[in-house]
């Protein structure tokens, strides 16, 4: 179980700082510091060690135990034998430098103090050092008042020092309050940067945090007085001994630098045209790990930082460290910048890096690859989300392994990834990386002991820095990825401007399609299906048409796929079903008994996947009064084969209603006889491709006869689609095909036209023999 020092570190530090700074003199402060430190760590011993033990709690009277405490302070002992207590875990923290003294605690336990406790004790030691400095200044000021008027100037200096130290204490307390109330990380860091810049009276102050996944890059910069372009340069900087920010992190100590100390824009872009010439940088920590740097800088080349000012900067750096080690703020920063499943950058961090690259890339071109996994949903649905997450982690690792040093990969969400390729000479270099990624992802992944295969569709785009913004570049890569996916799984496509135009046309079409239903722009046309022996119209197929304002009739092959992808097909499909049943009911009312045709309605894959679809059909039949046996639902063979188990379940539910079921475009979906027998269907509609050549190609005619014979074997009616000539009709009739559909009999027509046809052909269409 964590100790109170680990759980309530910020509150304990605020209490310690308040108690010590309120003491009347240095001796009282030492006693309070020893007591508060022992209480905070639930320790039996607490002590302040300067040249000797100046204050202690928990030790026997006299010298007993004091030698052991000195050993902890001077030799760094982690265990000590304390008279009257026994073996204790011990911990010491320097007040500033080891020569300044130590704050020591010892606890009756063999379990060593944790990193978080060591960090808290270090903070207490620094706070005590600052508070004692203030007390010493106060005591000196009191002494100086007793001296003559000649010491007035020195008194003024001491008073200013006292004012600064009191301000420091106020600022530190304000920071601790912000951390304690769980203020957002940026608010805490902003408070620290403002305080450091104000108290030290410098032109620039900044906090730069290292990327935990890539410790050679800064992931977050919070600054005051620094132009945006300078922040970009700092984030893009790499470790260098001449850069004070990286030098302080590497040396893990305060670093002073002179000269051009911060990378950035031209001098005239800095406030007042004066870039920084002197900088002081102090490392900040996450636990024991250097996690970044707090830096202040001045445009005055004569600026000098004394010991007291370095101590002020270190005190603020400690506050940054405490904020970073707080679990909630650390998790907040990590969630904002790194994907929890793959460890890759998030979209937010990727866009930030892309924006920086477009501003100041070293190469002539910047490239982006937009990656979408093919067949990932099948893995998720089949093996579960845990297996899906394992696969995403593997995909992220493989993508990262394909990149060059300096390139970045991100997960945008779901199964979408992006790659930033910086500083390339031509698009061929980006294509080579996309090739490596595609080849790597095609290799089998072992998930829960099973081989899993996925492909990736990749969109590639390149640009020169400054030509286009980051959002537009990613959009273009996404457009190219969509084109790759349309071309087939496992491909890459390089973006061109025609794709953008095509994409914009598609977006406009989608927007118009969303309002088409509400604006009554959709219509149904009907094409008769006739009995090849008698010419009777036994059924009509409902065909969706869209009259788009300003564009005229839109071909179904243009808008139906868009409706499928966007989910609009569910609402449109329900409207088609209801409208077709309503009109069919009118034919049954107006025609002689037994002469009204059934109506056939095409189903989409999305409709067939809906668990409540059979209930929807039942409700429409009840609402319109159409008999169930007057409705035929058509499903393409490819849809049936895509998810056979779901298809069988849904077809059985529909069959129970009494409706007819037809396999549309038969022969294009590669279904086996076994699977065909498992589907509870009534009709096979032979695809037009098998009918086109039956009148002039004997093999084509034999194949068509074989399909008809297959239907008869399975007790299914057969419909020949696309009959356009008398010869085709004769061949299919002689092949014992019962029904036919095509331009030979009638083109699709609206409801009024069909009604006229049905009234004029009650004795059937006249078929040529």
Image (cartoon, rainbow, N blue to C red):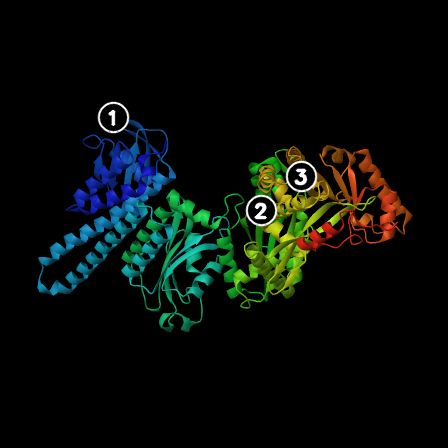
Q: Earlier in the sequence, mark 3 or mark 2?
A: 2
Give the number of the mark in front: 3 or 2: 3
Position of 383 compared to 599: left or right?
Answer: left
**10 Å neighbourhood of mark 2: few (<14), some, or many (≥20)?**
many
Callout 1: SS: loop
Q: Residue at x 22, y 49 (%)?
A: 131
Report the residue marked by disc 2.
396
Task: Please indicate, yes or no, whether residue 291 appears anywhere in the rendered image.
Answer: yes
Position of 493 compared to 363: left or right?
Answer: right
| Residue 659 or residue 474, whichever sits in front | 659
Q: Is residue 679 above or below residue 573?
A: above
Task: Please indicate, yes or no, whether residue 96 appears anywhere in the rendered image.
Answer: no
Give the number of the mark in front: 3 or 1: 3
Position of 532 compared to 284: left or right?
Answer: right
**10 Å neighbourhood of mark 3: few (<14), some, or many (≥20)?**
few
Q: Are marks 2 and 1 in contact (CB under 8 Å)?
A: no
As drawn, the label of residue 459 is none
CA gap, disc 3 to disc 1? 77 Å
Report the residue marked by disc 1.
84
Q: Position of residue 367 (x, y in %)?
A: 59, 60
CA gap, disc 2 to disc 1? 58 Å
Callout 3: SS: loop
Q: Position of residue 632 (x, y in %)?
A: 69, 41
CA gap, disc 3 to disc 2? 28 Å
Callout 2: SS: helix
Q: Place residue 265 in its image quadrant.
A: bottom left
Q: Position of residue 633 (x, y in %)?
A: 68, 42
| Residue 172 or residue 650, whichever sits in front | 650
Q: How many marks?
A: 3
Q: Position of residue 748 (x, y in %)?
A: 72, 54
Report the residue marked by disc 3.
643
């Amino acid at each position: 179980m964590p100790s109170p020092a680990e759980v309530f570190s910020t509150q304990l530090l605020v209490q310690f700082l308040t108690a010590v700074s309120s003491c009347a003199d240095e001796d009282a402060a030492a006693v309070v510091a020893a007591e508060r430190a022992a209480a905070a760590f639930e320790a039996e011993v607490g002590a302040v060690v300067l040249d000797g033990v100046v204050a202690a709690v928990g030790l026997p009277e006299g010298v007993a135990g004091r030698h052991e405490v000195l050993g902890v302070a001077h030799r760094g002992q982690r265990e000590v034998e304390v008279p009257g207590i026994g073996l204790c875990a011990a911990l010491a923290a320097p007040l500033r430098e080891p020569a300044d003294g130590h704050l020591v605690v010892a606890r009756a336990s063999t379990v060593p103090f944790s990193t978080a406790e060591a960090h808290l004790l270090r903070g207490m030691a620094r706070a005590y050092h600052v508070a004692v400095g203030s007390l010493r200044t106060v005591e000196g000021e009191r002494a100086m008042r007793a001296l003559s008027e000649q010491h007035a100037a020195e008194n003024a200096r001491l008073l200013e020092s006292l004012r600064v130290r009191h301000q420091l204490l106020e600022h530190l307390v304000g920071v601790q309050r912000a951390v304690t109330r769980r203020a957002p990380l940026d608010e805490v860091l902003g408070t620290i940067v403002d305080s450091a810049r104000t108290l030290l009276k410098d032109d620039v102050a900044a906090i730069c945090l290292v990327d935990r996944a890539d410790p050679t890059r800064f992931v977050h910069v919070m600054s005051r007085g620094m132009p945006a372009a300078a922040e970009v340069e700092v984030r893009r900087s790499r470790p260098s001994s001449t850069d004070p920010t990286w030098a302080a992190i590497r040396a893990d100590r305060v670093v002073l630098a002179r000269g051009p100390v911060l990378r950035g824009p031209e001098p005239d872009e800095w406030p007042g045209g004066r870039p920084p010439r002197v900088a002081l940088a102090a490392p900040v920590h996450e636990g024991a790990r250097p996690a970044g740097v707090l830096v202040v800088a001045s445009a005055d080349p004569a600026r000098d930082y004394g010991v007291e000012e370095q101590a002020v900067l270190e005190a603020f750096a400690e506050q940054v460290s405490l904020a970073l080690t707080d679990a909630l703020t650390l998790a907040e920063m990590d969630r904002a910048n790194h994907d929890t499943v793959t460890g890759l950058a998030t979209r937010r961090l990727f866009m930030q890096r892309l924006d920086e690259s477009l501003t100041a890339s070293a190469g002539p071109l910047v490239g982006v690859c937009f990656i979408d996994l093919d067949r990932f949903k099948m893995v998720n649905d089949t093996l579960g989300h845990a297996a899906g997450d394992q696969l995403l982690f593997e995909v992220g690792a493989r993508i990262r392994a394909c990149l060059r040093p300096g390139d970045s990969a991100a997960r945008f969400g779901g199964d979408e990834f992006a790659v930033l390729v910086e500083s390339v000479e031509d698009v061929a270099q980006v294509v080579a990386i996309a090739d490596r990624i595609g080849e790597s992802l095609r290799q089998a992944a072992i998930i829960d002991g099973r081989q899993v295969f996925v492909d990736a569709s990749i969109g590639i785009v390149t640009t020169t820095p400054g030509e286009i913004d980051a959002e537009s570049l990613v959009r273009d890569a996404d457009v190219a990825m969509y084109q790759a996916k349309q071309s087939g799984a496992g491909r890459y496509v390089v973006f061109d401007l025609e794709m953008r135009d095509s994409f914009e046309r598609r977006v406009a079409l989608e927007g118009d399609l969303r309002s088409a239903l509400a604006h009554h722009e959709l219509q149904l046309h009907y094409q008769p299906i006739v009995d090849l022996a008698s010419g009777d119209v036994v059924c009509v197929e409902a065909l969706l048409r869209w009259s788009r304002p300003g564009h005229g009739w839109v071909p179904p092959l243009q808008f139906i796929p868009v409706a499928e992808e966007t989910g609009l097909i569910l609402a449109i499909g329900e409207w088609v079903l209801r409208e077709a049943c309503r009109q069919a009911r009118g034919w049954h009312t107006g025609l002689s008994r037994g002469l009204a045709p059934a109506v056939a309605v095409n189903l989409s894959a999305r409709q067939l996947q809906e668990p409540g679809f059979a209930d929807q059909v039942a409700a429409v039949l009840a609402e319109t009064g159409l008999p169930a046996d007057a409705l035929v639902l058509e499903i393409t063979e490819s849809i049936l084969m895509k998810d056979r188990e779901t298809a069988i379940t849904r077809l059985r539910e529909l069959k129970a209603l009494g409706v007819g079921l037809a396999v549309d475009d038969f022969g294009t979906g590669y279904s086996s006889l076994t699977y065909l027998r498992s589907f509870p269907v009534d009709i096979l509609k032979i695809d037009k491709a098998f009918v086109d050549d039956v009148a002039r190609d004997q093999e084509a005619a034999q194949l068509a006869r074989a399909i008809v014979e297959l239907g008869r074997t399975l007790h299914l009616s057969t419909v020949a689609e696309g009959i356009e000539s008398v010869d085709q009709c004769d061949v299919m009739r002689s092949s014992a095909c019962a029904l036919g559909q095509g331009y030979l009999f009638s083109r699709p027509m609206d409801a009024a036209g069909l009604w006229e046809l049905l009234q004029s052909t009650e004795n059937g269409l006249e078929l040529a023999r």
